[in-house]
Amino acid sequence: MLAIKNLSVSYGHKVVLTVPKLNINKGEIIGIMGQSGSGKSTLVNSCLGLVAYKGKIAVNTHDIGVLMQEQHYVDTMTNQKVIEGLLNTRIKSDRKLFDLINFFDFNSQLSLHFKNLSGGQKQRMSLIMLLYQEPTLLFLDEMTTGLDFESRRALIKKLKVYFKEHQTTVIMVTHYAQEIEALADKLLIIHDGQVKAFDQPKKLFQQYIGYSAFIIDNDVTKTVKVQKLEDEYKTVHQLLDDSDDFSRTRSSIELVYTEIMKGNVHG
Ligand SMILES: Nc1ncnc2c1ncn2[C@@H]1O[C@H](COP(=O)(O)OP(=O)(O)OP(=O)(O)O)[C@@H](O)[C@H]1O
C-alpha cells in the first residue's frame, strides 16, 4: 500500500527525517509515536506530498483520507446541512450515510451547529464525512487528543470495528499508548528524525522487554523484566517480600516505548 525508500526531508540545511526503508501493507494499522519535534508530521506530510523530499514514496491508491487535529466547518447552518452539502447527498435517501450516522451515534447532533459540539462529537462528525468517501488509506493525526477517557474509548472501539470490516490501511500519529494498544497492528517509533522501531507490539515487547514485566507502583520507569516463565515465580515472591504494589504485563506499549526511548532522551 505504501513503500518508502531512501527518504530524506530537510528544512533549509537541516535534515529532519531519514527513512531508509519502510513498507506498509494493505489493511495494516500503524501507530506512530515519538516526542514532539521528532518528525512524525513530517513523515505523514511527505506521504501526502505536502513537503518536498528526496527518495521514493510509492502510494498504491488515490483514495486517501486525512483527519487533522482541528476541523472547521461553516457555522451558519446545522450539522445536517453541512454534512449533506459537503457530501452532496441527503441522509434520508442515502443508506451509506444513514448507517454511518447511526454507527457513530450522531443523530441527536444533526440539528445542532458545529461550534456547539463537544470535542468527541466534532471528531465523529469529521469521521462520518471522511469514512463516507471510503478511503483505502487513512491518515489520522492525534485523533483523540482533547477527548475524555470515556469518549476516547468509545471512539476507538467504533473505529476498530470499522477498520477491520473495511480493510482500511491506517497510519495514525498519537501520544496515547491506549490508542495503539487497541487499534494498531504495528508500532512505529520515531526519534530525532530516525525510525527507532517498527514491528508488531508483541514482537517489540519480546525484543526489548522479554517474556513479561512487573511494573512497580504503576510506574513504567520502575520495572522488573522477566526473561522466562520460570523466572516469574521468583520475581513475584521477591516483590511480595518487599511488599511492593505491582502488576504483571506481557504487552504494554507504554513500557515498550519507554524502554526504546531510554538513552535517547535529552534534557
Ligand atoms: N516548516 C518547517 N520549517 C522548518 N522546520 C520545520 C518545519 N516543520 C517542522 N520543522 C522541524 O522539523 C522537525 C520535525 O517536526 P515535526 O512537525 O515533523 O515533528 P512532530 O514529531 O510531528 O512533532 P509534534 O508531535 O510536536 O507535532 C522539528 O525539529 C521541527 O522544528
Image (cartoon, rainbow, N blue to C red):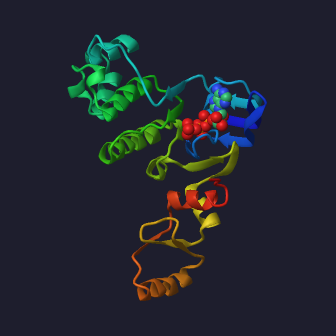
Choose top left, top right, bottom left or bottom right for residue 49: top right
Residue 11 versus residue 190 in the image, above or below: above
Q: Which quadrant of the figure has residue 261?
A: bottom right
- 254 sits to left or right of 124: right
Residue 238: percent from left, percent from top: 48, 87
Name the residue rendered at 61%, 40% in the picture. Answer: 37
Q: Nearer the viewer, residue 254 or 90?
A: 254
Q: Residue at x 34, y 28 (%)?
A: 122
**Who's the residue at 35% across and 31% down the image?**
124
Image quadrant containing the N terminus: top right
Split into quadrants, the picture shows ligand 1 in the one at: top right
Coordinates of residue 108 in the picture (x, y in percent)? 20, 27
Q: Residue 153 or 164: which is nearer the viewer?
A: 153
Residue at 51% x, 70% y is 222
- Residue 77 on image: x %, y %: 27, 11
Is residue 210 at least partly visible in the picture? yes
Measured as percent of width and height from the top left, residue 28 is found at 56, 43
Q: State left or right for residue 94 relative to residue 16.
A: left
Q: Is residue 83 left or right of residue 203?
A: left
Q: Is residue 1 visible?
A: no
Q: Is residue 150 above or below residue 3?
A: below
